[in-house]
Image (spheres, rainbow, N blue to C red):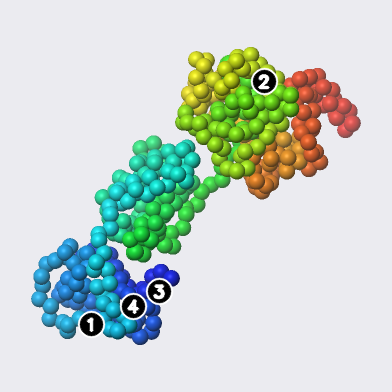
Amino acid sequence: MGKVRARGEAKRLYFDFRYKGVRCREYTALPDTPANRKRMEALMKRIDAEIIAGVFDYGKTFPGSRRAARFASPQPVESTPTEDMSGPTAGNAIDAKAARTDTPLFQEFIDEWMGEKEVEWKRSYQKKQVDIVNLYLRPEFGKKRVSDITRADLLKYRAYLAKDAHGTKALSGARVNQIMNLLKQVLDEAADRFDFITPYVRIKPVKQGRSKVDPFSLDEVRSFLQEVDPHWRPYFTVRFFTGMRTSEIDGLKWRYVFFDRREIVVEETLVHGLEDTPKTATSYRTIQMNQLVFDALQEQWERTGHTDGFVFQSKRGEPVRYRNVNNRVWYPTLKSAGLKKRNPYQTRHTAATLWLASGESPEWIARQMGHSNTKMLFTVYSRYVPNLTRQDGSAFERLLARNFVNPCLADADAQQEEGGHE
């Protein structure tokens, strides 16, 4: 059965009903008052009755509506003439949208909207959004007019995304939410521009699991670094012991490496071969070099320091392509070192958990990783927090010295600890 609803801040009334399997919304200029709602509900009942009887004439009831031509199939209408809802205060309510032009196809509108958003989005983020449009939204909604997309369409599509394997593997909850969030932005904007009610209402995001945290132990880090191609050893040493994101280390240039201050400044990134800026405002940061990172960068300086460009490069002297490094270096090294398969992002988790395990201050760790506060640390890495005593990175330096620089010290500490328990 049809409904009388109100829209916008002005609360103007409109008809919402289905006719021949199509959801129809016809807007009026009437404010939502008890008297106006009563009149419209009476007319809505009459429309429902005519639809059931098979005598409803869309064009006669809503003259000038953009849907009138679509349903133009003259039928004798024996019902009482439609009530005239014009008046000194209401205006021509039913025909309020008569002068409105057809809304554009979804594919036309989203192309225009994406072009407008270019100035707001980082290039890497823009590429992700373009991929979502081309892979998912355009094939599904491209040929529909933006105002014809219904809430039922959206719910059905969300279920499809969450269940369908898409030829490879099921989409994650996070990916489904990314797709649906972009769709919401587009439909909300279209509704504002073309004055219709957005269908994206009361649609909740799907549940998504937590990011898997599977950091390396120090022994595993040592095994990996001993096994990896020497060309890439400095690269992965820096990744494991600074917590830099892939885009940050791939985009690192020598102008941001300060050996005298033992600092790395994160100012640029490299994503899909494009130079860009860091992910968030707090991602712009200064990272302190521990001894292993300092030594690794000194070694790397001998290879690429003369270029004044990217710190880490391929053997051909080209910028790092992370997929190539993942497929040709990372995963083969894990296999040859006898380590379980993990994604490269675990190097960032490893840095965080090692800092925490060594007793460094969470505030200091958050600054090193580019977090705005310590919430992420306690949410994701809570089980790795033994104490909060250190403040400056010195505890981590001692941990590395015992295990990498002078393993004999680690053995001596272990023996002393065992003796203390006897």
Residue neighbourhood size for the residue with mark 4, other residues' Cα within 10 Å, grouped as few (<14), some (14–19), many (≥20): many
Closer-to-camera residue (126/161): 126
Residue 302, compared with residue 76, is above or below; it is above
User: Where is residue 373 drawn, in percent x and y?
Assistant: 67, 47
Q: Earlier in the sequence, mark 4 or mark 1?
A: 4
Residue denoted by label 1: 84
Mark sitting earlier along the chain (4/3): 3
Q: Residue at x 55, y 29 (%)?
A: 251
At 43% from the left and 43% from the top, the residue drawn is 118
Task: Give amino acid for label 3.
Answer: Lys
Residue 380: image quadrant is top right
Label 3 crowd (10 A; few <14 / some 14-19 / many >=20):
some
x, y percent for residue 203: 43, 59
The amino acid marked with disc number 4 is Leu
Q: Name the disc covering residue 248, or none.
A: none
Q: In the rendered picture of this protein, how many numbered marks are placed on residues?
A: 4
Residues at discs 4 and 3 in contact (Cβ within 8 Å):
no
Tag 3's secondary structure?
Answer: loop
Q: Which residue is mark 3?
A: 11
Q: CA distance from mark 4 to mark 2?
A: 72 Å
Q: Which residue is mark 4?
A: 30
Q: Which element carries disc 4, helix, strand or loop?
A: strand
Q: Are marks 4 and 1 in contact (CB under 8 Å)?
A: no
The quarter of the image holding the N terminus is: bottom left
**Label 4 vs label 2, nearer the camera:** 4
| Mark with earlier residue (4, 2) | 4
Say which amino acid is labelled 2.
Ala
Q: Is residue 192 left or right of residue 395?
A: left
Q: Nearer the viewer, mark 3 or mark 2?
A: 3
